[in-house]
């Protein structure tokens, strides 16, 4: 009876290459995840939205010792393809991808779902759902030895959360995309996960009305009675990229102190 010898945790992702999309500042969920991936030894490519965002993201990319640092606005035609082309040229492979972006125009997000105009709906779906599908398409050929794809979702996809509105519709579509993509790429050893953190005070969340009340409710009702941090999300997400998680795929991983099980 041989007891398995696990590699030292700190080098469990040594030599693995990952793309991190969605760091806006040091409060971002993507930053929490990137730190955890890097702590496990992975090399990271980091993107930033535009020139205005660059000054906030660049010091973080330096702290991660990211050898690849590129602009990526999924609304700019061809920019996503350029990022993956650059990764192909520099690394020739990709082992994991983190998609942590979502967007809805203010008038679409702040109104009722029933009133959302077509262009507001399309913009919400395009950035929040289709961009992940497209990234998965571009990452697949680079994941020659298997890999992991991550995207970020929220409980408002399953339950009606006040003020989450059309973003709940987009996240429900995103979670369905995760299941379908997981089924399609699974035979190649590629896993796909939707990560569903509890409410976090990120820049993205600041656009949701009455968000403080949402956080208070989450803290008082979650079984652990605690709010989640970006580091909590990062540690759990990084675990799913490890070899030990190779048979976990296609599901929504809740990192919310158990809030989603409470009525």
Image (tube, rainbow, N blue to C red):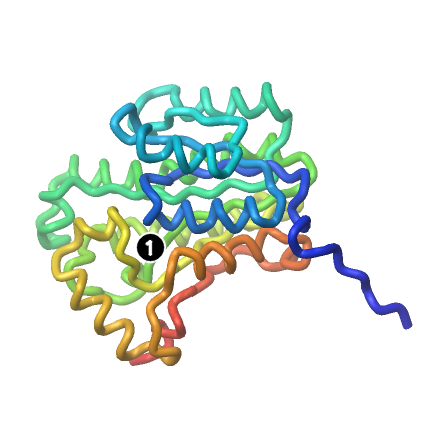
Residue placed under numbered mark 1 in the picture: 172
Name the quarter where the C terminus is drawn. Answer: bottom left
Query: In the visual, does 37 lie left or right of 76?
Result: right
Q: 112 and 52: which one is in front?
A: 52
User: Closest to the observer: 260 or 238?
Assistant: 238
Residue 137, percent from left and from top: 50, 33
Q: Quadrant of the N terminus?
A: bottom right
Q: In this view, does 76 lie to the left or right of 246?
A: left
* Picture coordinates of residue 227, whole percent (x, y): 33, 68
Indicate whether 230 appears above or below 76: below
- Is residue 163 shown above or below 256? above
In the image, what residue occupies the spot 41% across and 31% down? 47
Q: Is residue 61 above or below residue 151?
A: above
**136 sits to left or right of 206:** right
Residue 184 falls in image quadrant: top right
Q: In which quarter of the image is residue 221?
A: bottom left
Residue drawn at point x = 49 percent, y = 59 percent: 251
The residue that appears at 41% across and 26% down in the rendered structure is 80
């Amino acid at each position: 009876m041989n007891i398995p010898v696990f590699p030292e945790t700190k080098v469990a992702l040594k030599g693995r290459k990952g793309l991190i999309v969605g760091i806006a500042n040091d409060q971002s969920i993507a930053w929490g995840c990137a730190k955890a991936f890097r702590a496990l030894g992975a090399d990271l490519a980091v993107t930033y939205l535009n020139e205005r965002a660059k000054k906030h993201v660049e010091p973080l990319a330096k702290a991660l010792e990211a050898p690849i640092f590129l602009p990526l606005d999924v609304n700019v035609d061809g920019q996503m393809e350029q990022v993956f082309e650059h990764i192909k040229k520099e690394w020739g492979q990709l082992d994991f991808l983190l998609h942590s972006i979502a967007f809805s125009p203010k008038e679409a997000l702040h109104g009722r779902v029933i009133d959302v105009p077509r262009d507001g709906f399309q913009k919400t779906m395009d950035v929040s759902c289709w961009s992940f599908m497209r990234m998965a398409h571009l990452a697949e050929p680079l994941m020659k030895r298997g890999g992991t794809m991550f995207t970020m979702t929220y409980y408002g996809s399953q339950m009606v959360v006040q003020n989450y509105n059309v973003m709940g519709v987009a996240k429900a579509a995103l979670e369905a995309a995760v299941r379908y993509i997981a089924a399609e790429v699974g035979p190649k050893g590629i896993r796909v996960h939707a990560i569903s953190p509890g409410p976090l005070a990120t820049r993205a969340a600041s656009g949701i009305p009455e968000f403080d009340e949402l956080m208070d409710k989450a803290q008082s009702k979650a079984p652990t009675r605690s709010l989640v941090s970006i580091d909590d999300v990062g540690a759990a997400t990084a675990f799913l990229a490890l070899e030990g998680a190779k048979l976990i795929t296609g599901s929504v991983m809740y990192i919310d102190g158990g809030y989603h099980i409470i009525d």
